[in-house]
């Protein structure tokens, strides 16, 4: 690779849609997003776009993204076409660096280019990378859509950049990516907090629940892990079309086998699968849980009232005895 090779600045841009083919791009002067004066225009990396070091933590990455988004968010600059392009490149850089597997691959490419003494290269975009190369949902496209949009109704012409223009969607996306990073860095307790919050806020998201279950397994919370894996299967069966979720089925089977031994595995293997009609929707489960909580609160209040009444009666009887 010669020193005149194009830059690694954006490798390729995710502008063809959520599941469409990425397009190639080469960084030019207008693509630099106000690069430092001492940096050649063909040497921008995703780290340069976000103005962070290559050793930046996720917290530093998140802070930098919000700061840079204010500078080039299209809604803050009257829909400027130049700012829109800048925002696309910023979101693409953040999308790669906020995912631990994509960031590792990108860093390896950067080291490769640095070792060769080249200024950069262009190639296919670093796309979504499922664990072990096996998608969690029924396809890689389903994984990508599940992370950003729960369900099947994708807005026409939706792209990662258009979705990230919404602050609420951005906040959820960043929280989930932070959880993945913490899990990748072997910090399961911190990751558990992020995934728990994400699942509570978006209870129908299968990907969030899967990673919450994976974190529970890492923390040896096997019963809770199985509960979330089972919920994933219930959610998948309610989709249109239904998601079979083979990876999740396999992991649930392994989890049961490890926890219950051979006899438990044999019982599960002989048990016929429940018909689709037996699955409860997430909304129905939430209603039942709320109803049980209300009943518990009402009963607790009734018990406390009876205890208070008994105490008042005992005090009254004591006073009567003193008078007599």
Image (cartoon, grey):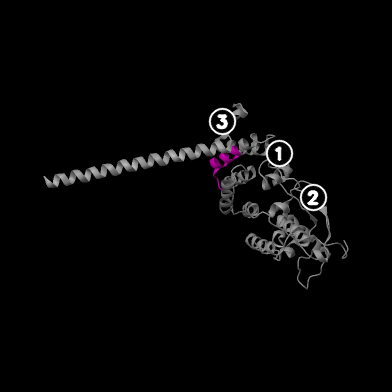
Query: What residue occupies the far left of the structure in this picture?
Result: 324
Q: Residue at x 75, y 57 (%)?
A: 88
CA–CA distance in space, label 1 to label 3: 30 Å
Q: Residues within 10 Å of mark 2 (few under 14, many from 20)?
A: some
Left or right of 17 on screen, residue 298 = left
Q: Determine whether the residue tagged by mark 3 lies in a helix, strand or loop.
A: helix
**Tag shown at residue 138:** 1
Task: Look at mark 2 in the image and give the residue it sits on.
Answer: 16
Numbered circle sitting on residue 92: none
Viewer-nearest residue: 140 or 287: 287
Q: Which residue is mark 3?
A: 263
Q: CA distance from mark 2 to mark 3?
A: 51 Å
Q: Secondary structure at mark 2?
A: loop
Which residue is depicted at the point 65% across and 52% down? 169
**Residue 253 visible in the current orientation:** no
> Is residue 227 part of the magenta span, yes or no?
yes
C-alpha span from label 2 to label 1: 22 Å
- SS assignment for the magenta stretch, majority: helix
Q: Residue at x 70, y 51 (%)?
A: 163
């Amino acid at each position: 690779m010669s020193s005149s090779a194009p830059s690694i600045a954006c490798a390729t841009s995710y502008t063809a849609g959520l599941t469409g083919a990425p397009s190639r791009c080469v960084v030019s002067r207008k693509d630099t997003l106000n690069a430092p004066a001492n940096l050649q225009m063909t040497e921008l990396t995703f780290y340069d776009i976000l103005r962070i070091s290559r050793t930046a933590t996720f917290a530093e990455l998140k802070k930098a993204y919000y700061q840079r988004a204010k500078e080039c968010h299209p809604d803050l600059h009257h829909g400027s076409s130049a700012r829109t392009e800048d925002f696309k490149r910023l979101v693409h850089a953040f999308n790669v660096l906020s995912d631990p597997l994509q960031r590792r691959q990108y860093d390896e490419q950067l080291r490769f280019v640095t070792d060769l003494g080249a200024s950069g290269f262009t190639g296919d975009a670093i796309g979504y990378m499922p664990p072990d190369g096996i998608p969690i949902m029924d396809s890689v496209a389903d994984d990508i859509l599940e992370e950003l949009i729960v369900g099947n109704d994708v807005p026409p012409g939706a792209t990662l950049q258009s979705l990230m223009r919404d602050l609420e969607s951005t906040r959820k996306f960043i929280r989930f990516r932070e959880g993945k990073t913490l899990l990748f860095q072997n910090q399961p307790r911190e990751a558990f907090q992020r995934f728990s919050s994400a699942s509570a806020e978006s209870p129908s998201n299968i990907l969030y629940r899967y990673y919450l279950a994976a974190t529970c397994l890492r923390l040896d919370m096997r019963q809770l892990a199985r509960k979330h894996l089972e919920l994933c299967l219930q959610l998948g069966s309610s989709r249109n079309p239904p998601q079979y979720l083979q990876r999740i089925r396999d992991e649930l089977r392994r989890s049961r086998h490890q926890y219950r031994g051979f006899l438990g595995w044999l019982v599960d293997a002989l048990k016929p699968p429940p018909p689709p009609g037996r699955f409860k929707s997430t909304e129905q489960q939430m209603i039942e849980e709320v109803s049980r909580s209300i009943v518990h609160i009402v009963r607790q209040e009734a018990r406390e009232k009876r205890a208070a009444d008994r105490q008042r009666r005992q005090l009254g009887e004591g006073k009567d005895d003193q008078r007599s």
